[in-house]
Amino acid sequence: MKKMSIALSLIWLLSCSKVENSDLLWIDIDKNGFSEFLLSDLAVDISLVTLQTSEESFITFISDLKSYKNNLYVMDGIKRVLVFGDDGAFLKQLGTRGEGPGEYQYVNSLSIDADANLIYLASQRKILVFSEEHEFLDEKKLDFYSGNLESINNKLYTVSPSYGNPVSSGFANYTNLYELNKSIEVVDTIPVRTVLLDKNQASKYGYEHFISVVNEEMYLYTPVMTNEKILRDTLYQLEENRLIPYAKLYFDKPHFDDRGNKNIWIFNIINSKSYIICEYSQKGQKMLYLYSKRDSKGYKMKEGILDSQGDAVVLRPLDLSNDMFYYTKKEEFSDKSIEEPNPLIGIVKLK
């Protein structure tokens, strides 16, 4: 209990005031005005992939994307995983819907271990394992909900939220980070946070990029999507199974309006080899902040960075060790026989 109190005090301190810590990367988001520039000015390479649209592969929303051995693994809005070639040709659905072995009702997260040639799907309270040929190999049931999942250094890590737990003051939402071994057995549990609420409340954002992996090092940011009196603005690094503050994003005050509601909602903080990207909203305006660690410069953009057509797009993680990201946008109509085409995917390598 004493260790937990110390940890919570540290989180409160980092969230509410400027911390004088030479090892902590301090990023002043509101130091400059709004920026507006083209993605092509920042990218070494941009490749566009149009996903084949068919009755079996129709997608309205892409919540995650992985690239592995010339294939694209797409987690869509109805929480299944579809496999496409890197040219966009539809290949198959990975696994099937159901309750039996190798089946899932919906997928929470997708991770690929390129060294072991294994594909992991997190589905509620179980993890399914597939081979690189997409054959079902194994599944393990868990005692907890498995959320954002990543494979690092022959281990699996999963972020597990638990909502609506009754406590004396009302309700508590807990977030834990679980370390799993190759047999998908729990090795360690790392408490991330406890949020106390008067009412039983829970909310999620459609894109959950909680874990960043850079050169086999892991970074974590998990948002709180309910109103509270703390601005959670710190990205953490996992070191020896401890979460150490790595970067703090400083937003100008007031962080809250006159009624105590958040002015700023942080959805994701992503770390790559050369950049930190924050996706957030400020007074109802969707924002994207991109910070270059090489030259210590930051760019604050409304909605996102502009593609070649002048549309604002949001960069999402693909291969963070190599500064590779992806974005999605609705494809323009080309075949009138198709009611609505699949999204267009942009694969981006930043400078």
Image (tube, helix red, strand yellow):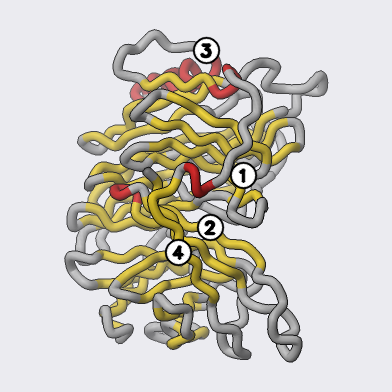
The numbered dot on residue 304 is 1
Whole-number angstrom distance, CA of label 2 to CA of label 1: 10 Å
Q: Residues within 10 Å of mark 3 (few under 14, many from 20)?
A: few
Which residue carries the number 2 mark?
A: 327
Q: Secondary structure at mark 3?
A: loop
Q: Nearer the viewer, mark 4 or mark 1?
A: 4
Which quadrant, please, contains the C terminus? top left
180 left or right of 91 in image: left
Amino acid at pointer 2 = Tyr
User: Residue 85 or 135: which is nearer the viewer?
Assistant: 85
Whole-number angstrom distance, CA of label 1 to CA of label 3: 28 Å
Q: Residues within 10 Å of mark 4 (few under 14, many from 20)?
A: few
Q: Who comes first in sequence, dot 3 or dot 2?
A: 3
Amino acid at pointer 3 = Ser
Q: Secondary structure at mark 1?
A: loop
Q: Residue shown at 32%/28% (left/top)?
A: 244
Residue 215, position as x, y percentages in the image: 23, 46
Q: Secondary structure at mark 2?
A: strand
The numbered dot on residue 47 is 4
Quarter location, residue 265: top right
Q: Disc 3, disc 2: CB below 8 Å?
A: no
Q: Nearer the viewer, mark 2 or mark 4?
A: 4
Q: Who comes first in sequence, dot 4 or dot 1?
A: 4
Amino acid at pointer 1 = Gly
Q: Disc 2, disc 1: CB below 8 Å?
A: yes
Q: Nearer the viewer, mark 4 or mark 3?
A: 4
Q: Who comes first in sequence, dot 1 or dot 3?
A: 3
Count how many numbered circles sit on residues in the image: 4
Residue 301, position as x, y percentages in the image: 62, 36
Whole-number angstrom distance, CA of label 2 to CA of label 4: 11 Å
User: Residue 309 or 50: which is nearer the viewer?
Assistant: 309
Is 344 placed above or below 271 here?
Answer: below
